Image: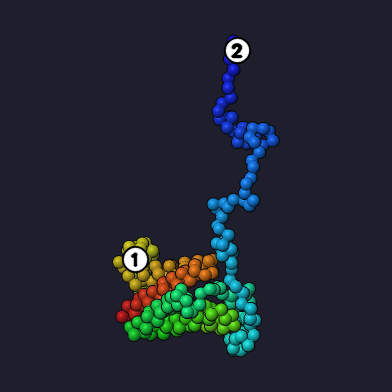
Amino acid sequence: MTSRHPLPPLLILLLLAYAPPSQGFLPAPVSHVSRPLPSPLLPPPALASALASKKAPLSTPLTPSSLPAPLLPLAELLDGASDGWAFQTADLSPETPSTPLGAAFLATNLGFLAAGTSLALNGSPLLGLLTDAAGLVSFWYHYDQLQGDAAAVRLSLLVDYLTAGSSLLLGLFYLLSAVPVLDPLPALLAAGPAGLLSLSPPFFYAVASSVVAVSSLLLCWVWEYGLPYLLLHSVWHLASAVTCYFVGVLRADTLL
């Protein structure tokens, strides 16, 4: 009697899995769904649409009617250098200055006023005044942004660039100028976070908060719409205000 060896089970499974329906191994599938099933790797349609949204281009041109004539050359320089990106802004609708989320977002600018006023009264008057100015102008810009007033946003955004940029550049100068006073740079780098914290808490907190601030700013340029922008940009406001405060404290300490 001749013995027959059955096909290995693994080979049978492979044949069933890869053979096309026309070969007869499996019946042709019958679809009862009129549209493709969503992939778990893809976001839901509403979220996908939101993620695909970019900055809403402002409809008003750069003319003296939308900006004061003395500021127009600077605005045109920024607009050209950034290929129009510098004067585009996130669409925050349906939020407005009077909705709870919009009002809470505007309130995060109070961090600049608190930090700036404290610095102005305690040994860092220039950085304190610039931080106060940055907070006031930031409130103005984001109020226009929440209002959806494209023409008004151009002016307030340009002034926001000037005040925020001035305070950040001065803060960076103060931070870097404090490094030689504290310790040689290689020693600072070798100390690590724990050593740096024990060496100079204001320096450590200034650097740590600046990392949080810059990270949140970069992320809100990626998710530049609605609630994600409001949350991330709020973190930017609060963390950068903390950075300004500790840089000012560090500056006052190093001048003693």
Secondary structure type for disc 2: loop
The quadrant holding residue 153 is bottom right
Residue 12 visible: yes
Residue flagged by tag 1: what amino acid is it?
A: Leu
Q: Position of residue 160 (x, y in %)?
A: 51, 81
Q: How is the image coloured?
A: rainbow
Rendered-image quadrant of the C terminus: bottom left
Question: Mark 2 packing: few (<14 Cα in 10 Å), some, or many (20+)?
Answer: few
Secondary structure type for disc 1: helix
Rendered-image quadrant of the N terminus: top right
Q: Residue at x 58, y 59 (%)?
A: 45
Give how far apart the Cα atoms at labels 1 and 2 are.
83 Å
Q: Position of residue 130 (x, y in %)?
A: 44, 83
Instruction: Find residue 13 and name its label.
Output: none
Residue at far right of view: 22
The quadrant holding residue 155 is bottom right
Q: Position of residue 231 (x, y in %)?
A: 46, 69
Question: Mark 1 packing: few (<14 Cα in 10 Å), some, or many (20+)?
Answer: some
Judging by the rendered image, the residue that carries numbered circle 2 is 2
Q: Is residue 6 left or right of residue 228?
A: right
Judging by the rendered image, the residue that carries numbered circle 1 is 196
Q: Is residue 220 left or right of residue 116?
A: right
Camera-nearest residue between 31 and 247? 31
Q: Residue at x 53, y 66 (%)?
A: 223
Residue flagged by tag 2: what amino acid is it?
A: Thr
Q: Residue at x 57, y 81 (%)?
A: 149
Q: Is residue 27 above or below residue 227?
A: above
Q: Is residue 90 above or below residue 39?
A: below
Q: Earlier in the sequence, mark 1 or mark 2?
A: 2
Q: Is residue 201 left or right of residue 136?
A: left
Label 1 vs label 2, nearer the camera: 2
